[in-house]
């Protein structure tokens, strides 16, 4: 147990050294670029999900048929939205979600997913989130395919993104993780730098 505690202690110190080394490699320009490119304001979205349903032992033909049926249903709903006037879109979308959506957790609330940001909904919703950020408030998407099936997405509201000062620490953490992932030699260099700093031959 004592040896394990020592191992954890040393690992923690090494991680701190590596993190500090990576932070030194990140410039103010890197932080600003990340803020401009990656940080977004929250947006409020709703969706209608059309699941692709088939059994575990389904043939490729049966799977393709299930996908086609789900997509055709999505197209039918999309056609209804296209015939709806702009000022009635939100109301009609809510009605259609309650009638057609296969997302039981949101359908009774008109497909409302609330305010989201990149990564909020998890990897299953990556395509949905990316499409939502392409829309303007009051606009709906075409048919969006994801691991869950097919979606139609409505963006209803937007918030200003946080100031750079408010998210600086989060950005640095993300850039540190990115740097250490892309630079496998960073650990060795951080240890070498520490040895040189303290004029020691062994950590």
Image: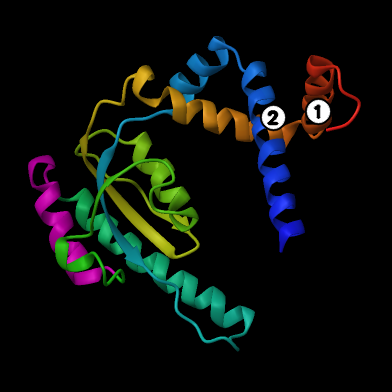
Q: Secondary structure at mark 2?
A: helix
**Residue 19: x %, y % from top left:** 64, 30
Judge from the rendering whether residue 158 lies leftward or rightward of residue 190; answer left or right: left
User: How would you rate the neighbour count of disc 1 (Cα within 10 Å): few for under 14, some for 14-19, many for 20 or more?
Assistant: some
> Range of the magenta residues?
85-101
Image quarter in which the C terminus is found:
top right
Q: Earlier in the sequence, mark 1 or mark 2?
A: 2
* Circle number at residue 10: none
Q: Residue furthest front?
A: 2
Residue 94 is covered by the magenta coloring: yes
Name the residue located 24 percent from the left edge and 70 percent from the top edge: 100
Q: Is residue 178 above or below residue 3?
A: above
Image quarter in which the N terminus is found:
bottom right
Residue 60 is covered by the magenta coloring: no
Asked whether residue 38 is in view, the answer is no
Judge from the rendering whether residue 46 lies leftward or rightward of residue 129; answer left or right: left
**Residue 121: x %, y % from top left:** 39, 53
User: How would you rate the neighbour count of disc 2 (Cα within 10 Å): few for under 14, some for 14-19, many for 20 or more?
Assistant: some
**Residue 7: x %, y % from top left:** 74, 51
Q: Secondary structure at mark 1?
A: helix
Give the labeled residue for mark 2. 17
Give the labeled residue for mark 1. 191
Instruction: State yes or no: discs 1 and 2 in contact (Cβ < 8 Å).
Output: yes
Quadrant housing residue 118 = top left
């Amino acid at each position: 147990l004592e040896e394990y505690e020592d191992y954890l202690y040393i690992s923690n110190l090494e991680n701190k050294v590596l993190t500090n080394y990576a932070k030194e490699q990140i410039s103010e320009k890197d932080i600003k670029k990340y803020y401009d490119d990656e940080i977004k304001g929250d947006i409020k979205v709703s969706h209608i999900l059309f699941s692709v349903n088939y059994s575990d032992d389904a043939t490729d033909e049966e799977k393709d048929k299930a996908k086609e049926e789900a997509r055709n249903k999505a197209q039918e709903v999309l056609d209804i939205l296209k015939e709806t006037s702009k000022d009635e879109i939100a109301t009609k979308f809510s009605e259609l979600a309650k009638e057609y959506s296969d997302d039981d957790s949101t359908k009774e609330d008109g497909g409302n997913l609330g305010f989201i940001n990149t990564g909020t909904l998890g990897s299953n919703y990556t395509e949905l989130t990316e499409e939502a950020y392409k829309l303007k408030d009051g606009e709906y998407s075409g048919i969006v395919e994801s691991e869950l099936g097919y979606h139609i997405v409505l963006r209803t509201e937007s918030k200003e993104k946080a100031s750079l000062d408010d998210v600086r620490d989060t950005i640095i953490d993300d850039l540190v993780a990115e740097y250490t992932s892309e630079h496998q030699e960073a650990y060795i260099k951080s240890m070498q730098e520490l040895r040189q700093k303290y004029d020691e031959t062994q950590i």
